[in-house]
C-alpha cells in the first residue's frame, strides 16, 4: 500500500529512525542535526527494573484502524519485531514507527532501552475500552486520548505528549464553510465520534439547535459527511488535515473536496493527549521520565516537524 503525498501535512519523510544504546535515544534524519540534552532515564527506570505485562518486552496498544498522521506504515510490510505473516493492522502499522504517535511511542520505548523488535502491539477496536476500568492487556495505549478527570478515575495518564485544537471539517460546497463564529455553527447538523473531546465540544461549546450525530469512530462519519447527512464533522485539527488531504480528496480534480472551516481556541477547549496506563501502574512514573527525555533533547519537536507541522493558517472561530 503506497501513501499518497498529503498537501497540508508536513510528513515529507515516511521514516524516522531511533538509535538505542544503553537507554539513550536520538532521532536520525538527514536534515536534522544531532540533538542535545539528557539522553537517559534514571537507574530506577532502567529496562530490567520495569514491571511489564511481558517481562523483557513492551506491550503497547493503539486503535485499529490506525489513522494518519498519527500512524503510518504499510500493513503489508514486515517490520522489525512484527509477527510473521502480518498482524492485522489496517491503514497504518504501528510496527513501522511512522507517524506522530507511532514515532513518539518508539522514542519513549527507546529511552527506556527497548529496540523496535522488543515491542509487541495490541490492537484496540473500541475507542472507549482503552480507558474503561479494569486490568489492561497493554503496558500503555496511545490513540489521541484526551486527559480528562473522569477518565483518570479509571486509568493512569502520562504527562501530555501533544496539545490539540478541535476543528470543523466540511465538504467544500456546504454552506457551513462560510461560518466564522461559534454562533453561526449552531444552525448546522454536526457529527463527532462518540465519547470523544469532539463530541463534548459540540455539546458544551457549540450547543447546536439540531441533534448531534455520533459515530463509533471517525471513519464511520466520512460517508454521512460526504452524503450531506451531516453538515460538518468535529475532529482535532491534525485529523482534519488527514481527512481533507487523504480520505476525502478527489485526486482527479485540482480543487479540494473538503475544507477545514476553522479551529477552536484553547479558551473554548483544552485538549492535551496522554498515554493510558492501568490505574496505579508502577510504569507510569518511568513513562513520564522517558517522555521528559524525548521532550528535553528535542526528539519530540523533531517528530512534530516531521509528521504534523502543516505550515498553514487555519482561522479560529470567534
Image (spheres, rainbow, N blue to C red):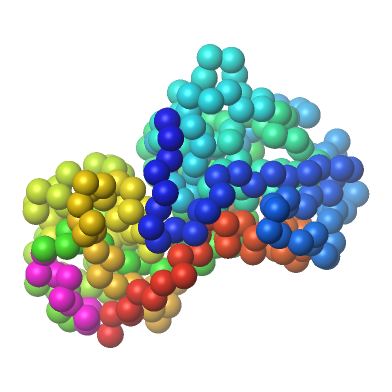
Question: In the shown orientation, is residue 143 left or right of residue 4?
Answer: right
Q: x%, y% of residue 147?
A: 50, 60
The residue sitting at the top extreme is: 85
Tell me the quarter of the picture where residue 8 sits.
bottom left
Instruction: Identify whether 298 is placed above or below 86.
Output: below
Quarter of the rendering occupied by the N terminus: top left
- Look at 82% across and 65% down and name the residue there: 36
Nearest to the observer: residue 150 or residue 5: 5
In magenta stretch: residue 115: no
Question: In the shown orientation, is residue 201 left or right of residue 162?
Answer: left
Q: x%, y% of residue 128?
A: 40, 44
- Look at 64% across and 33% down and name the residue there: 59
Quarter of the rendering occupied by the C terminus: bottom left
- Look at 24% across and 42% down and name the residue there: 220
- Residues shaded magenta: 174-182
Tell me the quarter of the picture where residue 78 sits.
top right
Instruction: Identify whether 42 is placed above or below 281.
Output: below
Amino acid at each position: 500500500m503506497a501513501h499518497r503525498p498529503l498537501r497540508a501535512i508536513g510528513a515529507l519523510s515516511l521514516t524516522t529512525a531511533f538509535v538505542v544504546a544503553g537507554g539513550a535515544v536520538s532521532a536520525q534524519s538527514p536534515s536534522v542535526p544531532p540533538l542535545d540534552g539528557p539522553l537517559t532515564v534514571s537507574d530506577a527506570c532502567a529496562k530490567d527494573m520495569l514491571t511489564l505485562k511481558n517481562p523483557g518486552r513492551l506491550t503497547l496498544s493503539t486503535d485499529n484502524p490506525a489513522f494518519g498522521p498519527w500512524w503510518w506504515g504499510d500493513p503489508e510490510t514486515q517490520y522489525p519485531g512484527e509477527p510473521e505473516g502480518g498482524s492485522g493492522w489496517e491503514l497504518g502499522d504501528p510496527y513501522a514507527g511512522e507517524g506522530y504517535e507511532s514515532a513518539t511511542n518508539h522514542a519513549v520505548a527507546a529511552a527506556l532501552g527497548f529496540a523496535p523488535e522488543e515491542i509487541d502491539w495490541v490492537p484496540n477496536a473500541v475507542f472507549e475500552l482503552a480507558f474503561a476500568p479494569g486490568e489492561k492487556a497493554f503496558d500503555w495505549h496511545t490513540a489521541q486520548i484526551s486527559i480528562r478527570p473522569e477518565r483518570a478515575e479509571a486509568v493512569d495518564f502520562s504527562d501530555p505528549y501533544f496539545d490539540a485544537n478541535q476543528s470543523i471539517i466540511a465538504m467544500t460546497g456546504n454552506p457551513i464553510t462560510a461560518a466564522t463564529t461559534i454562533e453561526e455553527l449552531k444552525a448546522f447538523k454536526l457529527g463527532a465520534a462518540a465519547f470523544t473531546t469532539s463530541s463534548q465540544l459540540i455539546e458544551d461549546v457549540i450547543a447546536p439547535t439540531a441533534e448531534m450525530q455520533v459515530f463509533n469512530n471517525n471513519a464511520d462519519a466520512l460517508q454521512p459527511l460526504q452524503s450531506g447527512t451531516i453538515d460538518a464533522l468535529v475532529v482535532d485539527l491534525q485529523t482534519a488535515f488527514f481527512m481533507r488531504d487523504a480520505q476525502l480528496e478527489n485526486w482527479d480534480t485540482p480543487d479540494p473536496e473538503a475544507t477545514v472551516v476553522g479551529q477552536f481556541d484553547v479558551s473554548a477547549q483544552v485538549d492535551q493527549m496522554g498515554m493510558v496506563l492501568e490505574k496505579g501502574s508502577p510504569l507510569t512514573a518511568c513513562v513520564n521520565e522517558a517522555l521528559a527525555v524525548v521532550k528535553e533533547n528535542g526528539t519530540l519537536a523533531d517528530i512534530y516537524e516531521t509528521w504534523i507541522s502543516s505550515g498553514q493558517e487555519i482561522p479560529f472561530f470567534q
